[in-house]
Image (cartoon, grey):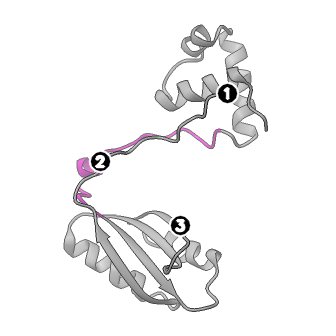
């Protein structure tokens, strides 16, 4: 789907504050609330907007330890296998196939180092994982939602 300038502004406003009303957005993009709703419905049905969510500070719910783990896998491991395996672990907040030596990069959050160690043991027990390399996050410096590119 091709986004026009109004669609891009609507998406940017929703990224900034998904709780904005259609009337508030409409005032910013010079459309009525029903027109904004129709556009948002179209953006959702076409998959541009995947959903709305609440962003929770991990430490507020006791998940104070964060790590990125490189997975090294057996030769014929598929991205689908990695997806299925990593979804079994609630501590996995992201998993990606990557270029370079590792086959995948997994983003984990855990309550503490002991919990992180348990998660690593479970990941290493997956039949296709041959080894891992972990990097524990000391501090998050930049964390932003997906940027919306400006029209030229």
Quadrant in the picture for the N terminus: top right
Q: Is residue 108 left or right of residue 147?
A: left
In the rendered image, residue 34, in percent from the top left (x then y), is placed at 70, 14
> Given the current orientation, which residue lies at the most extreme right position?
1
**Tag 2 or tag 3, which sits nearer the N-term?**
3
Tell me if residue 73 is in the magenta stretch.
no
Residue beneath label 3, please? Answer: 96
Q: Which residues are magenta?
A: 49-66
Q: CA distance from mark 3 to mark 2?
A: 21 Å
Report the front residue among 123 and 72.
Answer: 72
Tell me if residue 50 is in the magenta stretch.
yes
The local secondary structure at tag 1 comes to loop
Numbered circle sitting on residue 7:
none
Residue beneath label 1, please? Answer: 151
Residue beneath label 2, please? Answer: 141
Q: CA distance from mark 2 to mark 1?
A: 28 Å
Say few, some or many: other residues with alpha carbon within 10 Å of mark 3 (under 14 / 14 to 19 / 20 or more). some
């Amino acid at each position: 789907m091709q986004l026009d300038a109004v669609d891009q502004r609507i998406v940017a406003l929703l990224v900034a504050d998904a709780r904005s009303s259609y009337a508030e957005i409409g005032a910013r993009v010079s459309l009525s609330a029903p027109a904004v709703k129709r556009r948002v419905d179209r953006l959702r049905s076409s998959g541009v907007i995947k959903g709305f969510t609440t962003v929770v500070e991990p430490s507020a719910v006791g998940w104070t330890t964060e790590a990125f783990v490189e997975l090294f896998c057996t030769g014929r491991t598929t991205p689908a296998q990695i997806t299925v395996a990593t979804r079994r672990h609630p501590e996995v907040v992201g998993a990606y196939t990557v270029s370079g030596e590792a086959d995948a990069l997994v983003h984990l959050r855990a309550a503490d180092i002991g919990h992180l160690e348990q998660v690593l043991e479970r990941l290493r027990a997956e039949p296709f994982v041959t080894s891992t390399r972990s990097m524990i996050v000391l501090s998050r410096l930049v964390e932003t939602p997906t940027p919306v590119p400006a029209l030229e």
